[in-house]
């Protein structure tokens, strides 16, 4: 089954991305996924301030700056991995180098018949 | 008149439901589909068996029919499902094994299902109901009754959990060694909760619950055959057997509740108690202590009274302290206060009770029963009466109510 590992990071985490100790953890983890041959997709994302949101407003569209800033955790990126079951996905999720303020959500990929 | 074939179908349904569901679900990883397939197979059995007679191997017949239904449904769902071929092979292999010997060897997959039902990805509050329904085949209505919720609400929550198992890809497997201890904790808690439901229902208001103690013990035994070196599995089984051995001493001849320390030890079942002793000793030799062994050890201290005619309260204080350190539940804290009351007196025990969070104890019956007892020992009669009344109001068993009312009367007549 394919699972998305959805990474959420805190504001401090986004700042620490310049810190080699933090960054190297992510590089190593990504390498391990590739090495295991289970990484099928994924992307790291720039900090939430760089985001722009488009919302439908009736017939029109409304363009706004960034996501709501009040959330403690913001989407930082995601991996899509191919593993046999949820336990295997959980095993990989526990290795994700998130800080104590961050989190990893595991979601099965939508199957389109 | 109920025909033999009806009875045979019903018998197989009752005895093999969990086994068949577990087997079908483990292969297809889809509990709702397995249930549909099996109920269609049972309906077919009721149609066909009266005409052609009951087959020699009714379980095998049902499995074959259910398997066919399941495969058909899978084909309808998706033609690209390349897993279906593996499923077909696994079924054929199992049917061969079942049919070749006169005593059918059935691969019992129930324990794998047990791990799926108590997976941490599923909300903990539904673990036990899910286990009762899918592993033991107890109907949703009975489960709802035991959990005091409406049957509709219970059914909905069960359905949601089964969909989660299927869609999240929760595995049907005994977890690997490195994650086994934490997963096992979920399984053990769910089994013990089932035992507790059966235990609470012993008063006969709800006959359907009584069987649960036996089922829970059966699951404990089955778990031990698969995991013979896990001390916590032995601890749980030992704990349940200690409780079971005292079953007939819980009520006196008039059906009045007897607290543990006032029970007639001659009514305790020596054989069951000896088995519990042996299990606890074996678990201890493995040198990995845990909350279930601790709770069994607490029971073993009480059980020793049958030989020494005395209870070692100091040992109980130490064990409850250890239990709170491992698993700080409200029940453990209240029991700890109760044994402190024995060793150090009522006043220090009340200090411990006062430290508990008010919101947590508001509807916790044992807290009020212990509190009432301690207050009456101190001669604080008004406060004791108040606490007894709350404890009585929170009791769900008539026998316990009668017992506490008796205690209340003694305080009133002082």
Image (cartoon, coloured by chain):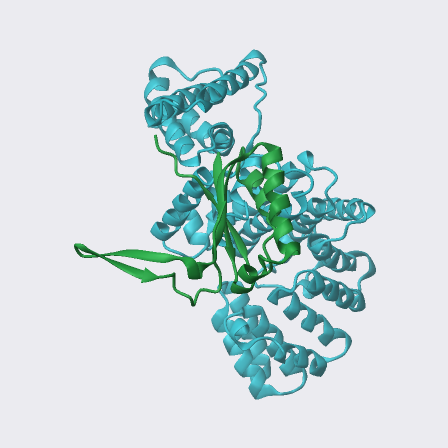
Chain colours: A green, B cyan
Looking at the picture, tell me which residue is in the foreground, B385 or A106: A106
Residue sitting at x 55%, y 34%: A38
Residue A21 pos. (x, y %):
66, 55
Q: Is residue B3 visible?
A: no
Residue A2 pos. (x, y %):
48, 36
Looking at the image, how many numbered discs can be counted on the residues?
0
Q: Residue furthest left?
A: A59
- Name the image quarter holding the N terminus of chain B: top left
Residue B180 pos. (x, y %):
66, 43
In the image, residue B101 above or below residue B342: above
Residue B58 pos. (x, y %):
46, 20
Looking at the picture, tell me which residue is in the foreground, A8 or B141: A8
Can you tell which quarter of the image residue B413 is in? bottom right
Q: Is residue B316 visible?
A: yes
- Name the image quarter holding the C terminus of chain B: bottom right
Q: Is residue B271 left or right of residue B184?
A: right
Looking at the picture, tell me which residue is in the foreground, B36 or A40: A40
């Amino acid at each position: 089954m394919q699972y998305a590992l959805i990474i959420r990071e805190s504001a401090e985490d986004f700042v620490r991305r310049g810190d080699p100790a933090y960054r190297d953890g992510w590089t190593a983890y990504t390498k391990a996924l590739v090495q295991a041959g289970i990484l099928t997709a994924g992307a790291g994302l720039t900090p939430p301030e760089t985001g722009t949101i488009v919302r439908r407003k009736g017939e029109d569209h409304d363009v706004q700056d960034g996501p709501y800033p009040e959330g403690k955790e913001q989407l930082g990126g995601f991996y899509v991995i191919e593993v046999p079951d949820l336990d295997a996905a959980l095993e990989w999720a526990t290795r994700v180098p998130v800080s104590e303020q961050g989190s990893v959500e595991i979601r099965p990929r939508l199957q389109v018949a | 008149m109920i025909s033999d074939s009806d009875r045979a179908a019903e018998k197989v349904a009752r005895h093999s439901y969990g086994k068949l569901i577990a087997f079908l679900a483990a292969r297809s990883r889809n509990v709702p589909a397995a249930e549909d397939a099996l109920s269609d197979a049972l309906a077919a059995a009721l149609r066909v068996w009266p005409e052609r007679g009951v087959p020699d191997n009714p379980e095998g017949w049902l499995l074959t029919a259910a398997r066919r239904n399941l495969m058909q449904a899978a084909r309808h769902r998706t033609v690209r499902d390349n897993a279906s071929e593996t499923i077909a092979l696994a079924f054929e292999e199992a049917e061969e094994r079942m049919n070749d010997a006169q005593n059918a060897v059935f691969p019992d997959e129930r324990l794998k299902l047990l791990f799926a039902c108590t997976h941490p990805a599923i909300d903990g509050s539904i673990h036990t109901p899910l286990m009762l329904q899918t592993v033991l085949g107890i109907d949703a209505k009975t489960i709802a009754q035991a959990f005091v919720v409406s049957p509709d609400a219970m059914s909905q929550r069960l359905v949601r959990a089964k969909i989660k198992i299927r869609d999240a890809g929760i595995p049907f497997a005994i977890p690997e060694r490195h994650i086994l201890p934490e997963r096992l904790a979920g399984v053990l808690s769910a089994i013990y909760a089932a035992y507790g439901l059966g235990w609470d229902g012993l008063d006969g208001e709800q006959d359907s619950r009584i069987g649960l103690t036996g089922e829970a013990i059966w699951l404990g035994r089955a778990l031990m055959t698969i995991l013979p070196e896990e001390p916590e599995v032995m601890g749980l089984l030992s704990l349940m057997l200690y409780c079971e051995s005292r079953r007939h001493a819980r009520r006196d001849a008039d059906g009045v509740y007897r607290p543990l320390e006032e029970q007639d030890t001659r009514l305790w079942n020596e054989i069951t108690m000896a088995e519990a002793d042996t299990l606890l000793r074996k678990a201890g030799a493995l040198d990995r202590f845990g909350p279930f062994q601790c709770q069994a050890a607490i029971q073993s201290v009480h059980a020793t009274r049958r030989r020494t005619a005395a209870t070692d309260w100091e040992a109980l204080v130490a064990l409850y302290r250890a239990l709170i350190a491992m698993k700080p539940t409200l029940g453990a804290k209240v029991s700890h206060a109760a044994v402190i009351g024995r060793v150090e007196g009522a006043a220090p025990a009340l200090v411990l009770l006062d430290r508990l969070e008010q919101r947590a104890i508001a509807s916790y019956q044992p807290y009020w029963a212990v509190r009432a007892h301690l207050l009456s020992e101190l001669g604080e009669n008004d406060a004791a009466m108040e606490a007894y009344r709350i404890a009585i109001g929170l009791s769900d068993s008539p026998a316990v109510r009668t017992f506490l009312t008796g205690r209340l009367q003694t305080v009133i007549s002082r």
